[in-house]
Amino acid sequence: MGRRGKRRGDGMTARGLFEWVGAKGRAFVVAAPLAWLTLFFLLPFVVLAKISLSESAIARPPYLPIWEWAEGVLNVSLNFGNYLFLAEDPLYLMAYLGSLKIAAAATVITLLIGYPMAYVIARAPQHRRNILLMLVVLPFWTSFLLRVYAWIGILKGNGVINNVLMSMGVINEPLVLLQTDFAVYLGIVYSYLPFMILPLYATLVKLDEALLEASADLGARPFVTFLTVTLPLSVPGIIAGSLLVFIPAVGEFVIPALLGGPDTLMIGSVLWNEFFSNRDWPVASAVAIVMLVVLVMPIAILQRTQSGKEEAN
Amino acid sequence: MRRSFSLRLSAFLGFVFLYAPILSLIIFSFNASKLVTVWGGFSTKWYAALLQDQQILDAAWVSLKVALMSATIATVIGTLASYALARFGRFPARMMLSGAVTAPLVMPEVIIGLSLLLLFVALESLVGWPAGRGVDTIVIAHATFGAAYATVVLGSRMGSLDRSIEEAAQDLGARPIRVFFDVTLPALAPALISAWLLVFTISLDDLVVASFVTGPGASTLPMVIFSKVRLGVSPEVNALATLIIVSISAVILIAAWQMQKSEAQSH
């Protein structure tokens, strides 16, 4: 920018004017989105950190200011009580661990279901491939909330599964499927399956079939070829897909709220309840800050190094 | 052969898994019985009931307004950001821009919602804006994380554009802004439509962020659906879900078909 800006002094020839406008234009193209994102994405985290250090109060808004200017004295009172509270009450630790456990297990199940689907699509004839891919992507476009809702009708006491099983005489009493951890796993796997399939497909479709043929020619059985050739080569897709499922699953609120039971502990629902039910904004902020530092940042760093590695290849 | 059969079978079951819940949702929207999952004959009365439900109609209108505005703002921001990242090489604040524009993709919704609400509250007490919360604040929130999705969609297209055409236009004396509007933007059109549609559908679907940043009087459709669903399944929600899913699918399929057609022509 600076290099172009200097030429402004060359007198206002037509070309100089255009370049001046051009430099301004460039600055605008960078500054406009940067200003929006700084104001509405980065600045909120500063406020979040600030509120997490304030004391909750029955007021509007429901917290006390952390600094006060009185008679020439600036009083800053940082309240770390919210963080101590999180450390003391085992509920929060359990919820963080519960989220990690549920998200990790659901990611593995999604991988096991998604891999064969991605493999079959990648090996399908060209004209059918696009249709199959469209079939994978279409549910992702339609409402997430409504697709989770669909499972309530299927899983509940007099829902589709129980009705079918009872009319076939397999069971006499309806099974308790809804409001269980099982339903939460099901909901996560179902909702995020397309996120797993797409990156897996992207790596599997690039796989050179000559490698598979070579392996078969050398006498390896299909399963051995899969383990020694296909699987190692699809690791980038496995990692990308797993991150795309794991990251949103950790902070998930809708799925545990609709399908989970009272025992389902996930940190997204804890934060929601802290804010909407207990109206404790400072504790909710502290929960969010811990979530940010413990869960989001390591994943973001991992993803950065991962995509950096991919670019290097 | 046997192995490939079991592989195909598991893929087939995977597709059944993806579509069975949606199909059951649609089938039971035509159920005469109020018990949703017990079949009581064919009926379209829940669709009629939907048109009488003022709460749902109002919420649908709010959601449509929010989605239209936030998709448009997000696409503009996304276009600028992806253009800067793809064409300007190294520039000051590049790291900051690329970080800020991708971070919303990995940020849990509850954190985006809570932190934005706290910002709005703090801004209101400091500068008096935004005065109260409602449609405007939801639009800002959706445009912000929508911009991240738009940048991803537009960035990948921008990267695959043939730059020699832009350079040719520049060599023929077109100013950068002219090159952008006459060459880059038309070539980006399919990606612009995808990005806009993506943000539109995400905004239409968002429950969590909107619940945090909204105020009294502005309930979006997902918020109304969520409060109804928490009380149990309702055939009316099934009818609404069917309308939403069928119309979104139709738009997406038509858009995909059109894009494939225009791509086939350009080759």
Image (spheres, coloured by chain):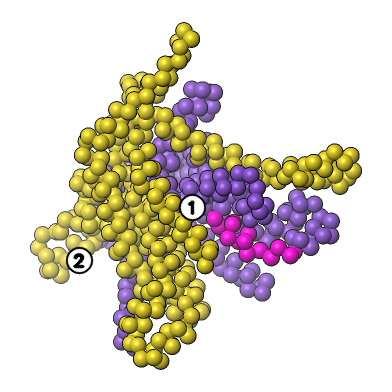
Chain under label 2? A
- Please tell me whether residue B13 belongs to the stretch shown in magenta: no
Asked whether residue B203 appears in the rendered view, the answer is no
Secondary structure state at the residue bearing disc 1: helix
Instruction: Please determine whether, in this image, residue B5 is positioned above or below residue B31.
Output: below
Q: Viewer-proximal residue, B250 or A273?
A: A273
Q: Nearer the viewer, mark 2 or mark 1?
A: 1
Colour chosen for chain B: purple
Which residue in the structure is indicated by mark 1?
B201
Which residue in the structure is indicated by mark 2?
A164
Secondary structure state at the residue bearing disc 2: helix
Specify the quadrant that holds the C terminus of chain B. Answer: bottom right
- Please tell me whether residue B164 belongs to the stretch shown in magenta: yes
Q: Viewer-proximal residue, A79 or A43?
A: A79
Q: Main secondary structure of the magenta part?
A: helix
Residue A263's x, y, as percent? 19, 46
Residue type, mark 2 in image? Val
